[in-house]
Image: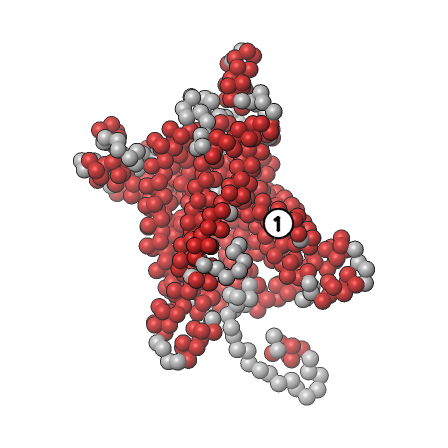
Amino acid sequence: MSSSRGSLPRYIAVRTLLVIPMMWVLLTMVFILLRVAPGDPVTAAAGGKLSADEIARRQAALGLDQPLFQQYLDYLGDVVRFRFGNAISDGTPVTTLIRDHGGATLTLTIGAFIFAVGVGVPLGRWAGRHRDTIIDAPIRLLGIVVYAAPVFWMGILLILLIGNLWPSWPTSGIASPQAIFEVPTHTHILLVDAAIDGTYFWDVLQHHLLPCFVLGLLLAGVIVRLVRINVIQTMQADYVEAARARGISERVVVRDHAFRNALVPVVTVIGLQVALTLSGAVLTENTFNWPGLGTDLVDYVIARDYVAVQGLVTFFALIVVIVSVVVDVINALIDPRVRY
Amino acid sequence: MALPGFGWTTRVWRTRGLARWMFWIGLAITAAFVVLAIFAPLIAPYGFAESRVDGVKLPKLAPPSSYFIFGTNDMFYDVFSRVVWGARTAMEVIVISVIFSVAIGVPLGLVAGFIGGVVDRVLVFLMDALYAFPSLLLAIVMAFLLNQKLGNGIVAAALSITVIYIPQYFRVVRNTTVSVREATYVEAARALGANPFTVMRKYLFGNVIQSVPVIGTLNAADALSTLAALGFLGMGIQPNEAAEWGYDLNRALDDPLIGVWWTGLFPGLAIVLLITGLTLVGEGLNETLNPALRRRRMLPVRFPARAGADERETEAGR
């Protein structure tokens, strides 16, 4: 990275430039996996339903009759211009999918994140401070079990539980049908649109709570483990011992000396959890009938639609890369050492 | 460094307190599932895809009873048998995927770390890209491709999962190789005229391989959750090929609406237990092997007795 002395703007510039090769590698990977490996997408999606002429025509329309290298260049050129192609099976442009369904995925993941950080950080800190005690054991076990429990299983159990305790609570979808029908579209993010409109805000929010909770639990498990380990490691650092030796109370040592430094790697790794969050979101969406991009992805995989799958996967890759840069920059702002 | 494989077993033995308990509990859980997997034909009352016994169809969605202790599901299968057979599927997939990712990741890491230069840079970059990618998406894409060629069996599922874990072995092995490469004994071996292959095989491999058991157990846990996720999304192993817990949960998704809980509870419980077991083993190993996490403990200094003192001394000096 920036080799010599680092100033912040310089670091940010270098980090941003590094996006290009990283993106290029990811895109090449997606291209090799989805375009070079499989054979013919048109036949795969349409099966035996089309005549040979029609197949050839559609292949030409998709540029599949071009040499592979030309296709590769076209693909890169399209992505740069934010074109992700049109689904073979139903003709929907992938950008339309992203616009219409991306909002549902966004509100789901953000809600989950807020929950996960709010619960995970304090619990992890508490467990790390009281390592190997009666406080540590259950929190650790909780961290492991929550991480071990598949989100879809948690979802099924909670649907069962809520169905028994509170039959009127919604356990499926992002809103009741009339809300979806009546909320006017401003931003394509249903939760925001409902908030602007006002009438159905509680309805949409209520539908969000359970899926956000389930996905949030998964992330909270990771965060608890991470914060705990990092607090333990910093608690053993020399400067913490030095603080203790100066007679500073244990509470203040944890708060001012250990915890803050323990948080730096945590911020990095939480940022990296964006990949886990996306994976978890795919599962959560499919559990709760959530009209997001994860549901779309699975539907198109089952329809064997290469173009739609490739477009969606490319979009996910973009998100991962962008978030990783943002996290690095935030880290550099928090911790001057990162810049050097 | 000590012989590979020797150091860590003794260290696990010497660990005290919670870490050791968690390790042993994890090992017990994992062992129980291994037993289930090996003796599945003896333990399970029915086959994994047996909906008919002596020409009589099993009941559909029967609640747990003395005949079907975990009940039956909507495909007329016995849930208990599916859970038991599922252990075998899980073990097979875990073993295949871990072996494959070790077999690919370790040599690549060794070569990259040892050779360095452009080869190293390119490999590191590729692996980082692979690692940054959402793992489930990668598995979905792989399953999407492999299902066409290999069908919906155990091998296809295991290979789809393998890709995710190669970068982790690569990274650890490469980094250790880079740090060990300049050690005096490697230099000595080179000075004696050992060729690169011999150096890698005899002098680097043994030292570099030490961290692999920890990653292996943690990956095994992760591989299982990926397998279940693929199954849940309908891209894993099909029910007539083998019993798979994730697929069973997919079938159970609508059952809560009609008040059926046994089809969802038991397969999920099996997943949670096995993952927890494997994670506990991995974490236990990690806490004892990772020097950064090892608790600083003042050992009582025992002065050696005047004659014949050898064993004690080494212990105190540890």
Q: Residue at x 38, y 28 (%)?
A: A96
The mark tally for this picture is: 1
To which chain does the residue with label 1 belong?
B
Q: Nearer the viewer, residue A230 or B318?
A: A230
- Considering every residue shown, the one lying at the far right of the view is B193
Query: x, y percentage for residue B61?
Result: 40, 32
Q: Which residue is mark 1?
A: B121
Viewer-side residue, B211 vs A163 = B211
Residue B142, horizontal then vertical, whole percent: 55, 35
Asked if residue A337 is positioned above or below residue A48 in the image, the reply reads: below
Left or right of A192 in this view: A215: right
Q: Quadrant of residue A129?
A: bottom left
Q: Return the x and y of residue A61 as percentages of the image width and height.
A: 50, 19
Q: Position of residue A101 (x, y in %)?
A: 35, 33
Residue B115, can we see it? Answer: yes
Displayed quadrant of residue B152: top right
Q: B84 above or below A241?
A: above
In the image: residue A138, left or right of residue A207: right
Which residue is rendered at x = 39% and y = 80% of the image?
Answer: A246
Residue at position x 80%, y 58% in the image:
B194
| Residue B110 visible at all | no
Q: Is residue B282 left or right of residue B260?
A: right
Q: Residue at x 47, y 33 (%)?
A: A79
Count residues near mark 1 (Cα–Cα under 10 Å), then give few for <14, some for 14-19, many for 20+: few
- Name the foreground residue: A33 vs B72: A33
In the structure shown, which secondary structural element does the residue marked by tag 1 occupy? helix
